[in-house]
Structure formats: structure tokens, C-alpha cells
Image (cartoon, rainbow, N blue to C red):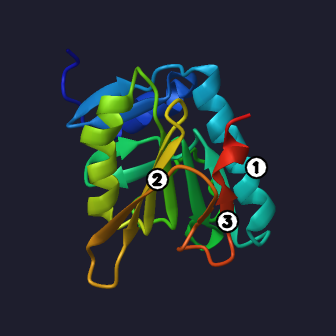
């Protein structure tokens, strides 16, 4: 097992080896594994659907890029929606690791055999603790989407979808047709 590292050491590793897709979990660097075609297709289809519906200039949609920060942990979601107001201004010419500590409107994990348990046990609970407005897990083989939506009292309501239109409640007017993800 890897030795625990500081956040500064982790950030240096992640910037020097971007292809490594490094996350930081409980002080230990963890490489995000390669994914299946089905996993990647669902993530790409979702990304395209979101980009088409979101107001240009107000949001960016990240596909397996950037990180969310949960305390001293860093995770790379499969898909996340980032309000452009959270983007840091360019300048100083110094590379900075893209990581968001602020709650995001939508964070999505697509199930895969290599990371399914890890997503459920490690990542999704941290997204909920961070206060992300919606957290989705999409299972490409079972064709099920589970959505956790933050309620006004800070708790989450969980709902499962097996087809049809799924509203992104944190992004009014944005709807994902579940069947369109499975191409």
C-alpha cells in the first residue's frame, strides 16, 4: 500500500503525472483505473446532453477532468457540472490543480466493475457530506440511475429511475432521457 502523503505532495504528483488520473483517499494517492466502453459511452452521452442544455457561459461540464475536494481528499468524478463563477481567474503563469471544495450542482459516477464498490463506499458518501446539490450513480448494465438530491434541511432524498426523462432539479429545465445514454 502507498505511504500517506501531504496534500502538497499529492498536488505535485497530480500535476506532474496528469495521465495518472490521481485521486487522494485517506492520505493515499490512488490511480483512477481505465474504464469500459459502456462506462465511457454513458459518461460521454451524459456530458453531451448536459452541454446542449446548459446556458453557455454559466456552466462547464467536466468529463473525467478536475477534482472535487472533500476535506483532505480529492476525487475525480466521471462527470461534474461546474458553475463558471467557481473558476479561478487565469494569471501568474503557475499551474494550479483544478479542485472544487464548494458544493456543485451535479456530480455523477458511472458504475464499473473496477470501481463500483469504491464509488458507493468512498466517493458518494463524501459528495453528500460536501453538500453537492445532486449526486447521481448510473449503472450502464442494469440501466438504473440513482439520484440523491439535497433537501432544504440538508438531508438527501434518494430516487431511482429505470427509464424516461430524469430532471436535473439543481439545474432548472435540464432533463436527461435515460435511454439516450445507452447507445
Q: Is residue 142 visible?
A: yes
Label whose residue precedes the other's in the sequence (2 or 1): 1
What secondary structure is found at the residue carrying circle 3? strand
Give the camera-side residue of 148 and 2. 148
- Farthest residue, direction front: 163
Residue ID at (52%, 24%):
17
Residue ID at (32%, 28%):
29
Q: Which mark is residue 3?
A: none
Residue 128 in the image: state x and y as whole percent: 31, 60
Give the camera-side residue of 166 and 60. 166
Residue annotated with mark 3: 175
Residue annotated with mark 2: 136
Quarter of the image for residue 120 reads: top left
Give the camera-side residue of 10 and 42. 42
- Please tell me whether residue 80 is drawn above or below residue 151 in the rendered image: above
Mark 2 closeness class: few <14, some 14–19, many ≥20 residues within 10 Å: many
Residue annotated with mark 1: 48
What secondary structure is found at the residue carrying circle 1? helix
Residue ID at (46%, 41%):
76
Residue ID at (63%, 30%):
40
Q: Is residue 93 visible?
A: no
Q: Separation of disc 2 and disc 1 at Cα? A: 16 Å
Q: Separation of disc 1 and disc 3 at Cα? A: 12 Å
Mark 1 closeness class: few <14, some 14–19, many ≥20 residues within 10 Å: some
Mark 3 closeness class: few <14, some 14–19, many ≥20 residues within 10 Å: some
Q: Quadrant of the C terminus?
A: top right
Image-based side of 1 in relation to 132, left or right:
left
Amino acid at each position: 500500500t502507498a505511504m500517506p502523503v501531504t496534500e502538497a505532495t499529492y498536488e505535485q504528483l497530480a500535476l506532474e503525472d496528469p495521465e495518472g488520473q490521481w485521486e487522494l483517499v485517506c492520505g493515499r494517492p490512488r490511480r483512477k483505473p481505465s474504464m469500459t466502453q459502456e462506462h465511457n459511452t454513458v459518461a460521454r452521452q451524459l456530458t453531451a446532453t448536459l452541454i446542449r442544455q446548459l446556458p453557455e457561459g454559466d456552466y462547464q461540464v467536466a468529463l473525467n477532468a478536475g477534482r472535487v475536494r472533500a476535506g483532505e481528499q480529492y476525487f475525480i468524478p466521471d462527470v461534474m457540472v461546474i458553475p463558471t463563477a467557481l473558476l479561478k481567474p487565469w494569471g501568474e503563469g503557475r499551474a494550479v490543480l483544478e479542485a472544487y471544495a464548494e458544493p456543485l450542482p451535479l456530480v455523477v459516477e458511472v458504475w464499473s466493475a473496477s470501481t463500483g464498490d469504491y464509488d458507493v463506499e468512498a466517493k458518494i458518501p463524501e459528495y453528500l457530506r460536501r453538500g453537492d446539490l445532486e449526486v447521481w450513480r448510473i449503472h450502464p448494465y442494469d440501466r438504473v440511475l440513482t439520484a440523491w438530491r439535497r433537501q432544504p434541511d440538508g438531508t438527501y432524498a434518494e430516487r431511482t429511475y429505470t427509464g424516461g426523462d430524469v430532471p436535473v432539479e439543481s439545474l432548472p429545465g435540464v432533463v436527461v432521457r435515460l435511454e439516450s445514454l445507452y447507445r
